[in-house]
Amino acid sequence: MPERTSYDAVIVGGGHNGLVAAAYLARAGRSVLVLERLDHTGGAAVSTRAFAGVDARLSRYSYLVSLLPPKIVRDLGLRFAVRKRTVSSYTPAVRDGRPTGLLVGGGEARTRTAFAELTGSDREFTAWQRFYGTTGRLAERVFPTLTEPLPTRAALRATVDDDATWHALFERPLGEVVEETFSDDLVRGVVLTDALIGTFATAHDPSLRQNRCFLYHVIGGGTGDWDVPIGGMGALTDALADAARRAGAEIVTDCEVTGIATDGRTAEVTCDQGTVGARRVLVNAAPRELARLLGEAPPPPAEGAQLKVNMLLTRLPRLRDPRVDPREAFSGTFHIAEGYGQLERAYQQAASGTLPASPPSEIYCHSLTDPSILGADLVRQGYQTLTLFGLHAPASLFTADTADNAATRDRLLAATLAELDTHLAEPLADCLAHDADGRPCIEARSPLDLDRELGLPGGNIFHRDLAFPYADPADEALGDARSAPARWGVATTHPNVLLCGAGAVRGGGVSGIPGHNAAMAVLEEE
């Protein structure tokens, strides 16, 4: 039960963004209550012993860190660290009937050689360096603005200070610059994948949702690096919960919020343990859930588009490409069926209502970089984890019926693993570990599973379509554009109800940025 009847701030949802907001506000001396529906905090950023009797703590949902600002780690004194992967990616291919692939990493000379061997010249590598040099400069300039008041479009463009880059990434469909810059289909596909993580779109989608997704994937940390959380994702959210409690925040789990009432100055939050008052309510849930709690009309439907799979192996499988060590290939992002043409075909098939014949996906092995998530016996025996993220699997391909959802998910999983097997020298099934009950150590989640388990609308990992990180005049309907919540991109139609989750402007990913920004908006108004 909550200890008090009224708080300065009640935070609905104990995911990582809610915990960030709680820690900042409590450190500033505010009374803070966090209410979490589940029996644990962490939301989608948790570590779980997923397989019965097996000592392996897997990052069940979200799994890599890019957007978490070091500022938040420092400000909150978090006992948390990340580790860089030694290889960026490996993409297997068949050229002239011979298994080959593209390994990006291991130093500039090695990467240059890999590009030349695959494509026959230095052209693509030179283009790659130039392109990612440009995105690197963009990241250095844009990432620091994410924890500042929301800039106008003109101000952000001035910060970028490169009209060609602005035009290419903020105004034109990403496919245009990819096709102008690169010639090789596989190289084009590797670039495009960052635009399609959890985003159902083509390279030429006029809405530019693919551009927005790409932007957030290449600016993280000011470098675009995607790092491995030491101890798994649960290590981050456990550290955040500890920081919030140390600062004085109260966290109540197993407590589902059922309603929010507000007159714009004060609010009441009703949960299954009673009602508490609040000066402000910060909602670490999707805009759909906020509308439900307020009794208002829901926003336009959101839709996720991914298959998430966790596996534990007794050993890494051997590759058909004999030149590449599996320990290198799987330590970075292992791209499957993600050539440029393959991605487009998969999109068109899914858009027509059928499962992709060759489902695109990407895999990485957390335990190669951070073996601490495995028990000592598993490490000694050579066990490894695999995390697979499938693309172009929109929620519309699945049905709400539990049995039908499971059957479709199993068909998609089988097709995805079959596609992986085409690049392996042995079936992946031969490498799967088994749990205490003799079952293979593999679990999969469809978008509808993520909706049911985490409240992600349609399984959308961003809660709704990502927005460009600047003020959009269309959002002025959310209230006074001069108000602190609007200035920080966390406003709703109610002055004292703020979004602090992924659905806020500059939300999405494991970042803590919306939680930070909501807390800053509260403190700025007082």
Image (tube, helix red, strand yellow):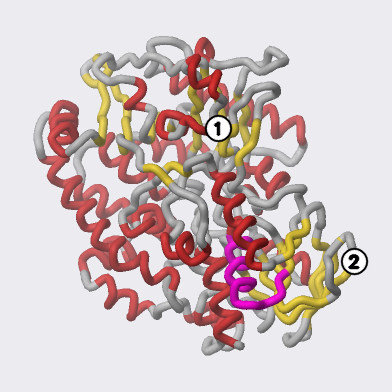
Query: Is 229 above or below relative to 174?
Result: above
Residue linked to disc 2:
274
**Residue 137 — which label?**
none
Q: CA distance from mark 1 to mark 2?
A: 45 Å
Q: Position of residue 219 (x, y in %)?
A: 35, 58
In the image, what residue occupies the spot 43% across and 61% down? 69
Residue 463 seen in the figure: no
Say left or right for 60 vs 228: right
Q: Which residue in the protein does label 1 denote?
A: 355
Q: Amino acid at mark 1?
A: Leu
Residue at image coords 68%, 81% = 496
Query: Is residue 100 something that shows in the picture?
Result: yes
The answer to if 82 sits in the magenta stretch is no
Relative to residue 250, is residue 512 drawn left or right?
Answer: left
Type of the residue with mark 2 = Gly
x and y percentages locating residue 72 in the rendered image:
48, 63
Q: Position of residue 60 (x, y in %)?
A: 60, 38
The C terminus, quarter of image = bottom right
